[in-house]
Image (cartoon, helix red, strand yellow):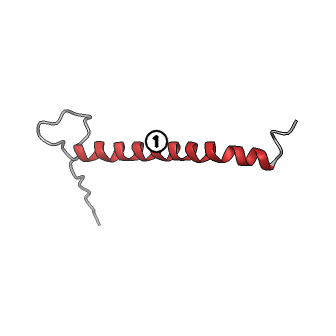
């Protein structure tokens, strides 16, 4: 009993595209993820900066 295996050729890049370049869709996906991460970090910083005074007051952090 003999079996033969064939390999499919590797996907070829789009004509006119330099090797290692990203498509427009890939760039938008990456940028969307980065911008979402930056937005969440800014939102978190904003929430913490507003809440830190109340947290310190409840722990009597400003008492002398």
Q: Which residue is mark 1?
A: 38
Residue 43 screen position, x and y as percent = 52, 47
Give 21 or 58, whichever is nearer the viewer.
58
Residue 40 screen position, x and y as percent = 49, 47
The quarter of the image holding the N terminus is bottom left
**Around disc 1, counting alpha carbons within 10 Å, would you say few (fewer than 14), some (14 to 19), or many (20 or more)?**
few
Residue 31 position by quadrant: top left
Q: Residue at x 26, y 39 (%)?
A: 22
Give 48 or 26, whichever is nearer the viewer.
48
Q: Is residue 16 left or right of residue 48?
A: left
Q: How many marks?
A: 1
Q: Residue at x 57, y 42 (%)?
A: 45
Q: Residue furthest left?
A: 15
Indicate the secondary structure of the residue bearing disc 1: helix
Q: Residue furthest bottom?
A: 1
Q: Residue at x 69, y 44 (%)?
A: 52
Q: Is residue 11 left or right of residue 60?
A: left
The quarter of the image holding the C terminus is top right
Q: Is residue 63 left or right of residue 31?
A: right
Give 45 or 60, whichever is nearer the viewer.
60
Q: Residue furthest right?
A: 64
Q: Is residue 55 above or below residue 3?
A: above
Residue 10 screen position, x and y as percent = 23, 46
Give 31 or 60, whichever is nearer the viewer.
60
């Amino acid at each position: 009993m003999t079996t033969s295996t064939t390999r499919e050729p590797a996907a070829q890049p789009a004509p006119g595209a330099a090797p290692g370049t990203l498509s427009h869709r890939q760039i938008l996906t990456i940028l969307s993820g980065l911008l979402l991460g930056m937005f969440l970090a800014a939102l978190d910083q904003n929430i913490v900066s507003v809440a830190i005074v109340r947290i310190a007051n409840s722990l009597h952090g400003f008492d002398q």
